[in-house]
Image (tube, rainbow, N blue to C red):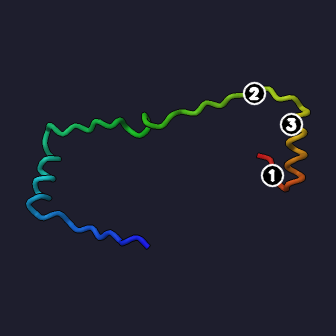
Amino acid sequence: MKKRIVYTNAPKDIAKSMMESMDDDDFVDFLPPPEELILKQSKENIPVDSQVVNHFKKYAQEHNKPLA
């Protein structure tokens, strides 16, 4: 079993200097907003022969798999 990690707060002087550094005007948020990070997925249509579709429908029925 892994040893549990216990976190503690930083000493007050270090915590104060960390907070002061984040209040600086020089602090720049360099990460883009989340909506720019998510890749847009496009839907593609692939022509499929009806025999192939029937094969997969039959397979789904035989294995009790619902069709989406």
Q: Which of 6 and 36 lies nearest the eye of the viewer? A: 6
Quarter residue 33 falls in: top left
Secondary structure under tag 2 reads: loop
Q: First in sequence, mark 2 or 3: give its number.
A: 2
Q: Residue at x 14, y 38 (%)?
A: 25
| Residue identifier under label 2 | 46
The residue type indicated by label 2 comes to Ile
Q: First in sequence, mark 2 or 1: give its number.
A: 2
Q: Residue at x 13, y 47 (%)?
A: 21
Q: Position of residue 44 (x, y in %)?
A: 68, 28
Q: Residues within 10 Å of mark 3 (few under 14, many from 20)?
A: few
Q: First in sequence, mark 3 or 1: give its number.
A: 3
| Residue identifier under label 1 | 66
Left or right, 47 with reference to 9: right
The image quadrant where one finds the N terminus is bottom left
Judge whether 18 appears above or below 32 on screen.
below
Left or right, 42 with reference to 65: left
Left or right, 13 with reference to 28: left
| Residue identifier under label 3 | 53
Q: CA distance from mark 3 to mark 1?
A: 14 Å
